Amino acid sequence: MSVNQSAPPVPPFGQNQPVYPGYHPASYGGQPGPAVPASPYGAYNGPVPGYQQTPPQGVPRAPPSSGAPPASMQAPCGQTTYGQFGQGDIQNGPSSTAQMQRLQGSQQFGPPLAPVVSQPAVLQPYGPPPTSTQVTAQLAGMQISGAVSHAPPSSVLGYGPPTSLASASGSFPNSGPYGSYPQSQAPPLSQAQGHPGVQPPLRSAPPLASSFTSPASGGPRMPSMTGPLPPGQGFGSLPVSQPNHVSSTPSHALPPGTQMTGPPGTQMTGPPVPPPSMHSPQQAGYQLQQNGSFGPARGPQPNYESPYPGAPTFGSQPGPPQPLPPKRLDPDAIPSPQLNELPPQQRARHRIDPDAIPSPIQVIEDDRNNRGSEPFVTGVRGQVPPLVTTNFLVKDQGNASPRYIRCTSYNIPCTSDMAKQAQVPLAAVIKPLARLPPEEASPYVVDHGEAGPLRCNRCKAYMCPLMTFIEGGRRFQCSFCSCVNDVPPQYFQHLDHTGKRVDAYDRPELSLGSYEFLATVDYCKNNKFPSPPAFIFMIDVSYNAIRTGLVRLLCEELKSLLDYLPREGGAEESAIRVGFVTYNKVLHFYNVKSSLAQPQMMVVSDVADMFVPLLDGFLVNVRESRAVITSLLDKIPEMFADTRETETVFAPVIQAGMEALKAAECAGKLFLFHTSLPIAEAPGKLKNRDDRKLINTDKEKTLFQPQTGTYQTLAKDCVAQGCCVDLFLFPNQYVDVATLSVVPQLTGGSVYKYACFQVENDQERFLSDLRRDVQKVVGFDAVMRVRTSTGIRAVDFFGAFYMSNTTDVELAGLDEDKTVAVEFKHDDRLSEESGALLQCALLYTSCAGQRRLRIHNLALNCCTQLADLYRNCETDTLINYMAKFAYRGVVNSPVKTVRDTLITQCAQILACYRKNCASPSSAGQLILPECMKLLPVYLNCVLKSDVLQPGAEVTTDDRAYVRQLVSSMDVAETNVFFYPRLLPLTKSPIDSTSEPPAVRASEERLSSGDIYLLENGLNLFVWVGASVQQGVVQSLFNVSSFSQITSGLSVLPVLDNPLSRKVRGLIDSLRAQRMRYMKLIVVKQEDKLEMLFKHFLVEDKSLSGGASYVDFLCHMHKEIRQLLS
C-alpha cells in the first residue's frame, strides 16, 4: 500500500479484521493459519473515525510563502501531520492540548473517546494564575497527502468568550488518514515564528501531559492549548527542545494546569474553512512552556519527498483571516482522491488518525536530538537518564551508570499510601556486569589488603560516596541505616572544610557510583581461594545430531574457538580449563591429557547413578593439550557417523558435568548441545505433553510448568557447586523447552533454540551465538544482594537465578547480558531531604579465579507530590518490569487473569494521574503524563506478545523459550523486542552513513515502492515492495525484477555498489548491537511469508486477536473513565 493512500480503517472491537483477498494468514512454516479470532475487548463505544492530529508544543513557524499549506496542515500548536513521510518529519503526540473529533459517519458510537492532550499537572501555582485560556476548533478527520507545516501557533482565532483562543485549524472532513484537500482552497494561516531565548529546564516545573478530548454529544469540542506566547517573543529563532523528563520553568512559568475547553463548535454546510484568525493577546509574566519529548519542529528531511509542492520557507507573513464556516458536512460527501483507491471494505469507515496519538518514533527521535550530544553526568541525585534508544556517554560522579541500573521512577513517593494510590511499580533493573562502550572506563578494582573492604557494622553496606564522615574523619555514619562506625586507623584521612575527606577523589569507593573490591579469603567458599573455572562441552551424538551435520560443524568450530576463551585483563592465555563429553543414551568421557598420543574414551552406561570415570586428564589446559584435543574433535564425527541411536538422556548429562566440576573443586559452565525430547529410560525422562487445546483454559499454565521436579533439584545442586548451564537446542519437534530450560534458568545460564536446524541456513546464526557465548565475560559462583536505605526494601526479584532465602540472589554464573529486576516496597516513611539509596553488591569469581565484589550505588529522590513521581518515571523500564511480572505470572495463573491484571494496573496508574495531577477537564479527554504517554502502546505490545496471546502458528516451545528469554533481558532489549524498529532503506541518501530514521510499526507506513528493514533483537526482515524500482532490485538482489527475488532468502548477495554496501553494513551494525545473531529473512509484498512479517507490525490489529494501538487506547480510556466515575 502506498504511504500516500488512505490507510485501512481499524475495525471496532469485536470485529474480525478484513484479510486482503488472496492472503492466507501463514504460519511460521508458511502453512495457512486459522481464521482471525475476535478481539479480546468488547465493542468500544467511542468514536473511531477522524481523530485529529495532536500537536507538539513548541515554537511556531510561519507557513510557506509559496501559498498556504493544505488546511489539514494547520494542526493546532504546530502538530505535524504527514503523508509522504519522511519519518523524521513527524511531530507526534501532543504536548499542548488538542481534541479529536468524530465525523458524522454511518456507525453509531456511545460516549466518544477524545484525542490526547498534553498538559502540565496541577501544582502550586508559579506566579499569578492567568485567566483560563480556552481554545476551540473543529478538527474532524483532518489528514493530508502531502507533508507538513510545523507551526505551533502563537496566534489564535477568536470566537467564543473574549478569553478563548481558537485553534489554527479548520475542520476538513475527508476520507481516510491521508486524504488531501486542494491547495487552492486551503486558507492561509496566521502563525508566529519561534521565540529566541528559551530558558534552561528546571526540575520544579509541573509535569507535562499528553491528552485527547472526545467531542461532546451533539457538537465537536475544541482543543485546548497550554497558553499564549510569552511577551517579547519575535519571529526569529527556531524552537529549542528540552529533555523529556524536564519541563522548563523559567523565571515566569506557564501557569500550571492551563487547560482549556471552549464552547461547542457550530455545524457547517459546504466545504468548510477554518475560522478567522487573530493574534492572541500576549499575557505578561508567563513563559511559553516547552515540551522536551517533542523536539523542535523540523523542515523536510534530506532526500525525503518534500512535504508539498514548494517546500516550506519559514518566515512568511500570516495571511488574512477567513470567514467562519456555517455548518459541518458529512465527510463522505467530499470525495478524497485517495478514497477511490481503497478496497471497498475499507471505504466504509473513517478512523482515528494514528498521527494524532503519541508516537514511539517521535519520542525516541526527540530524546536523541535533545540528550544525545551531552554526556550524562551521574553526580546529581534522582536524574532521569536519556532513553535506552539514545547513544550517550556516561560520566560517573557518584551514582551508577544507567547501563548498570535503571529505575521505573527516579522520584519515589515518601509514603506507602502514596505509592499504593499511584500504583506505579517501584523497581530497578540491574545489569551488574554490563559491557561498557570503549570510551567509558571499566570499574576500578580497589585492594584493601587483608583487612578487606570497609563496611557498616550493622547493615553490612559497603563504603561508598553516600557515607558521611564525622568527628574529623575518625568515624563515619552509614547512610543506609544511620549507624555510626569507627574508621580503622589504616583508612583514616582528614576532612576538608566541606566535611569531605581530602582523599575522596583518589579513592574510587568515595567518588564513583561503581567500582570493585578484591575479596579476602573470608568471602570464599570453605575459606579458601577458588581455582580458575572450567568449561565442559557436552555434545549430543544421536542420529538427529549426526544427520543434520550439527556434530561435524560444531567440532570443526571448537578447534579454533578454544583459542578465544575469556581471559583476565592483559593475560596471554585464558586460565579456563576445558573438558569434553558426548552422549546419546549413554555418556562418553574423554581423556585428553597432554602426555597422550591419542584421546581415550570411557563410557558410562549406568545413567541412573552417574559418576565421573576419570579425574586426571578430563579438564585440561588448551595450549598444553592442543594436539590431543584437535585429534578428538576430528574423530568424534567419524566415530558416530553410522549411529542409529535416536533416543537421548538429559538430566544425567548435567549431573555428570556438575560432578566433574565438584571433583575438580572449581566452578564452571556446561555447554550442552541437544536435539530431542529425552525419552530414554533415565532420571529426568520426559513425555510429549504438548496440547494446544489447553490454550485459553485454566490449565494453560501447566504448559509453562516443568513436567517433573527432577530438574529443580538438579538446578539447586548445580548452584551450590557454581555450575552454570548454557543450552543449545536443535529441535525438529516438541522438546518441552519449559522443562529443559529449568536448569539453565535457575543457574544463570542461557537457552538458544534453532528449530529445524539446517547447516546451510542456520550455520552462521548458530556459530555466531556460540562464539559470543563462549567469549563473553562471566562471573562464576556469584551471590548478589541489594541493600536499601531505611524506608524501602527489596521484596521481589525477577531473572535467571536461584534464591534459597529472601535476600540473596544466587547465580552459578552471571554474564554481561543478564539482568535482575528488583521490586521495592515501603516499610517506613521516606524523607524528601535524604532521598532513597540503593546499593547492589555482587560477589563473584572472575574467569581468572579471582574473588571480587562489584558495587553499584544509586541515590533517588523522594516526593510528597504525586506530580513529581509522574514527572520522573521511565516507561521503558516500567514495561521491562511489567513484562517480567506478567511472564512469571503465567506459570501460576490463567493467561487471561495475567492480561487483565496488566490492563487494570495501567488504567489505575493513568487514572491516578488524571485525578490528582491533571487540571480539571472534560471526562471525554484521555490525559497521559508526559513521561508515560507511550505506556499504552508499549503495554499493548506486551499483551499481544506470543506468551500472552499466541497466534495459531506459535508453538508451546516457542512460548516457553520467549518467556525465559525475556526474564533476563535488559531495558534496551525489551524495548526493541516489544516495539520492533522499522527502517526504510531507500529513502535516505545512499552516501549517508547514519541509520535511516525509523517509521512506526504499522502496515500503513509501508509503501510498495520502498524496501524496509525490521528488527526486534531476535528477528531481522527485509520487506520488498511490489513496485520497487528495477535498478534498486538489481543493486540489492542481483536480479532484474521483483518477481525473480527469492522469497525467504536468508543472505543478501555481496555486490560492489553503494546501495548493497550500505544495506549490508546496516545489517551488520544492527547485529553487532544485539545480544543474539538475528537471522535475515527476505519477504516480498503479498507473499505467504508476509503474514509472519506483519506479526511484528505491532501498532496494527494482530491475527491472534490482539487490539490495534488505536483500539487499545480507546479501551484504556474506557477503563480510566470507569475508574474515575
Image: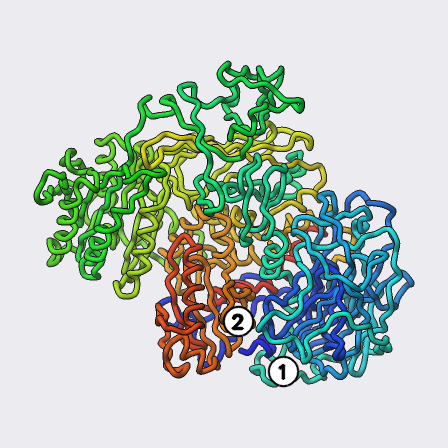
Task: Tell me, for residue 742, which label it has, or none.
Answer: none
Q: Quadrant of residue 123?
A: top right
Q: Is residue 157 left or right of residue 452?
A: right
Q: Nearer the viewer, residue 1051 or 496?
A: 496
In the depicted structure, whether residue 789 falls above or below residue 268: above
Q: Quadrant of residue 367?
A: bottom right
Residue at 27 percent across and 32 percent down: it is 666
Q: Nearer the viewer, residue 778 or 1114?
A: 778
Q: Nearer the viewer, residue 546 or 417?
A: 546
Which color scheme did the rendering employ for the protein?
Answer: rainbow
Q: Quadrant of residue 766?
A: bottom left
Label 2 with label 1: CB-CB less than 8 Å: no
| Residue under label 1 | 339
- Name the amino acid type tagged 2: Pro
In the depicted structure, whether residue 667 falls above or below residue 80: above
- Find residue 321 and report its horizontal and vertical position in percent: 86, 75
Q: Seen from this angle, which residue lies furthest left?
A: 597
- Find residue 873 and report its horizontal and vertical position in percent: 62, 46
- Name the amino acid type tagged 1: Leu
Q: Secondary structure at mark 2?
A: loop
Residue 585 at least partly seen: yes
Residue at 16 percent across and 44 percent down: it is 587
- How crowded pointer 1 is (Cα within 10 Å; few <14, some 14-19, many 20+) is rated as many
Residue at 38 percent across and 76 percent down: it is 1037
Residue 1122 at least partly seen: no
In the depicted structure, whether residue 32 falls above or below residue 870: below
Q: Is residue 424 left or right of residue 917?
A: left
| Residue under label 2 | 989
- Find residue 457 and report its horizontal and vertical position in percent: 51, 18
Q: Is residue 520 left or right of residue 463?
A: left
- Find residue 286 and report its horizontal and vertical position in percent: 83, 52
